[in-house]
Amino acid sequence: MATQFDKAAKCNEWLETGKILKQYIEQTLGSEHKQTAFMHQWLAYLYDAQGKYTEAEPLYQRSLAIWEKVLGEDQP
């Protein structure tokens, strides 16, 4: 049981760090950069892992939109 609490606490730490890192990457590289897409995707995954689907979905969608712009819509 303690392990689950430890995992949840660590996930929250990663989320807070990820939010800061995402903001930094967006400011440094731009909102349409592949690293920005990756950060949106990573944060979405963390929310998803916690069952916070309403928080995860817009991040997944934004990541997809960036990837489609960077790679093209026809990219598999």
Image (spheres, grey):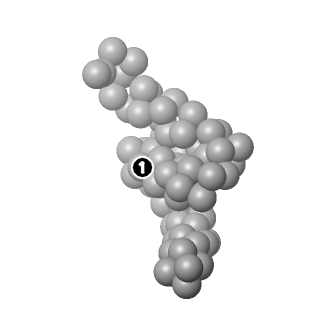
Compared with 12, 33 (above or below) is above
How many numbered circles are shown?
A: 1
Q: Secondary structure at mark 1?
A: helix
Residue 3 seen in the figure: yes
Residue 58: % across, % down? 64, 39
Q: Amino acid at mark 1?
A: Phe
Residue 14: % across, % down? 52, 72
Residue at position x 71%, y 43% in the image: 54
Residue 35: % across, % down? 40, 51
Compared with 12, 6 (above or below) is below
Q: Which residue is mark 1?
A: 38
Residue at position x 50%, y 80% in the image: 3
Residue 15 picture quarter? bottom right
Residue 27 seen in the figure: no
* Closer to the camera in the image, 32 or 10: 10
Compared with 36, 16 (above or below) is below
Residue at position x 42%, y 49% in the image: 38
